[in-house]
Amino acid sequence: MKKGLIDVISLGCSKNLIDSERLLRRLSAKGYEVRHDAEDPNGEWVVVNTCGFIQDAKEESIDLILQLGNRKKHRKIGKLVVMGCLSQRYMDDLKKEIPEVDVWYGKYDWKDLIDNLPDKTDEIYHRPKDWERSLTTPPHSTYLKISEGCNRFCSFCAIPLITGRHTSRPIEEILEEAHELVGKGVKEFNIIAQDLSSYGTDLYDRQALPELIDRMAQIEGVDWIRLHYAYPSDFPMELLDVMARRDNVCKYIDIALQHVSDKVLDNMHRHIDGASTRKLLAEMRKRVPGLKIRTTLMVGYPGEGEKEFDELIDFVKEQRFERMGAFAYSEEDDTWAAKNLDDNIPEDVKRQRLNRLMEIQQEIAYGRNIDMIGKTIKVLIDRIEGNTRIGRTQWDSPEVDPEIYVNGSEADPGDFINVKITKAEPFELFGELV
């Protein structure tokens, strides 16, 4: 155990990661040595930022807490602190089940940890601004969270139960953070929220995402802006004009559609039907030439029979999504679906449907990647392995989308280069420096 060291371990989504980065910044300001996601945590304090979204994520969080509790018993770490979505939702139960944890915080009150820790410096502690953080991503790329919470209340989703109502950050505050990050060398901004489409409705009584992105695109040094987690119902159509007009707004959008069957969408409380979904996608592609869409779909939801699943298969074949993920439905405590719908589709059927859907998508993705052979595209280099540079295009978000392996370049991470694509695999591209 190392005195004065605090290990912070972040689980779950990029929204959680930003909270961890804000915590790291405050701990550093108090004079502590901090590490993020160390393989062998041995700090005087260890803080786990948990995920509570789906069962697998909850199990991962609990398994890690138990492992750290065992390390604490053997004096390999000091105090154990848990924060985040899992503890926000299940704190009372967790306190009873895992007494090895010294302090519990939820999703939002983790800032109290800073006030409860003694200073490790003789300098007067100056509390950083709420948005200030220590980046854990590559220095040229970051996530930027513009709101918390969600008002949609999809019948399967526990997020509103964890994060509460939708709350937007003011435009000026977001732009101030963007200016600050550009000054630190950030070039790529991945804009994230649980529901991008609703941004601004609580603060300005209007959808303010188009204005925010348009103003952000005018900041010198912002080379790429990429948008994550739009909602299809009440989509802010003016955003498409901004995307088409601004070269540094990536022609990419992450919009979770979940399904296309009217019956299933109605059961999900998605406030949209299949025809409106198709109309929205067509309008997106028409108004933003070159747009690539990432979506997430769900199989095995209550009410999804063979007919509804076949509709989903036909939809995926028809749309040929450039990027797509999928998962099988699992019941979440206290959601409307858990209380009112019978989760009676066998797990093996869910798994078979998921596998079939992803096999079809793999063929689509491979075909789209083959179409890229011979084309020259702009690539942002993320890292170097041996003599190979590895990067992404404007159509590829970190961690979830394909990477491009480049030979014949001496570019450094953070550099933009032009690459001619020479080879394609289903989820990777290969190219040469032009």
Image (cartoon, rainbow, N blue to C red):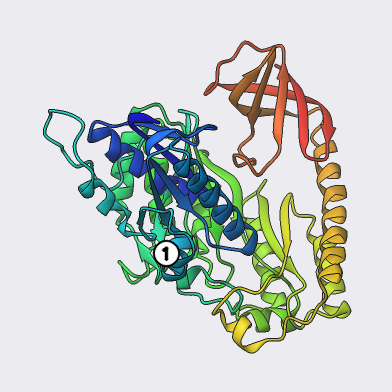
**Residue 198 in view here:** no
Q: Position of residue 217 (x, y in %)?
A: 42, 42
Badge 1: few (under 14), some or many (20 or more) residues near its Cα, within 10 Å? some
Q: Residue at x 44, y 62 (%)?
A: 87
Q: Residue at x 52, y 39 (%)?
A: 247
Label 1, on which residue? Answer: 95
Nearest the eye: 215 or 56: 56
Up the image or down, 234 lies above or below 399; here it is: below
| Quadrant into which the C terminus falls | top right
| Quadrant into which the N terminus falls | top left
Hey, what amino acid is under mark 1? Answer: Lys
Up the image or down, 124 lies above or below 217; here it is: above
Tally of marks: 1
Question: What kind of element bears circle 1?
Answer: helix
Name the residue furthest bottom.
340
Q: Position of residue 109 (x, y in %)?
A: 31, 59
Q: Position of residue 263 (x, y in %)?
A: 74, 84
Nearest the eye: 295 or 155: 155
Q: Residue at x 16, y 38 (%)?
A: 126
Up the image or down, 397 lies above or below 387; here it is: below
Q: Position of residue 378 (x, y in %)?
A: 63, 28
Up the image or down, 215 lies above or below 377; here it is: below
Q: Residue at x 32, y 54 (%)?
A: 110
Name the residue furthest front.
74
**Residue 5 in view here:** yes
Relative placement, left or right, of 54 versus 130 is right
